[in-house]
Image: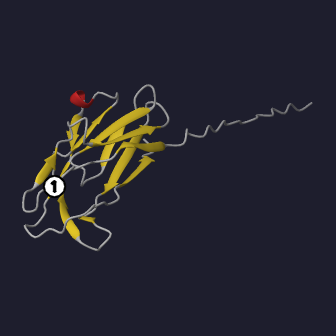
Amino acid sequence: MALAAIVTLAAQLEAQRPLAPVGTQDLTFGIVIPGLPTAVSRLDAANSGQYEIRGERLTEVRVDLTLPATLDSPSGAAMPLQFGAGDGGFADRPAIRSSQVFDPRAPLITGLSASGRLYIWLGGTVLPVPTQEQGDYAATIVLTVSYTGV
């Protein structure tokens, strides 16, 4: 008499919750005077760019910001933009004053909170020339977020 053992191997694959980055507030420089640089701090709750990322709780993510070099007007005029090492902030709760600084020109690798959230704030400086053309200027900032697999 022979005995045969049947072993069933099973694996359960769970998909990660999709990442959902949302821009909640535009980075706004307000009225700019030709020839006078205007800076907005990442800690400026009224004018900093603000983003919320939702995803799988307690997972590591990589955040990349594609930052424009200029603000552009519909007439084709351009106004230079500058982003520095201290212009980015992040936190696991929506408290701008408790945010940690990061360089928005480089990838940010951090974790989502126990509630699956990450908050990002962005400041920057606009550098109008003395002969800057009047008008409305705008640009697009692209925020890309992905799971690192860690």
- Residue 128 is situated, as x and y percent measured from the top left of the image, at 13, 63
Kind of residue at disc 1: Val
The residue shown at (34%, 29%) is 94
The image quadrant of residue 34 is: bottom left
Q: Helix, strand, or loop for circle 1?
A: loop
Quadrant occupied by the N terminus? top right
The front one of 79 and 19 is 79
- Farthest residue to the front: give it: 134
Up/down of 136 relative to 131, above or below: above
* For residue 33, above or below residue 149: below
Which residue is nearer to you in this view: 57 or 130? 130
Q: Residue at x 30, y 51 (%)?
A: 107
Q: Residue at x 62, y 37 (%)?
A: 14
64 left or right of 17? left
Residue at the farthest right position? 1
Q: Position of residue 13 (x, y in %)?
A: 64, 39
- Residue 36 lies in quadrant: bottom left
> Which image quarter is the C terminus in?
top left
Give the residue furthest to the bottom. 76
- The colour scheme used to paint the residues is secondary structure
Q: Position of residue 43 (x, y in %)?
A: 20, 36
Residue at 81%, 34% in the rendered image = 6
Which residue is disc 1 drawn over?
32
Dot 1 surroundings within 10 Å: few (below 14), some, or many (20 or more)? some
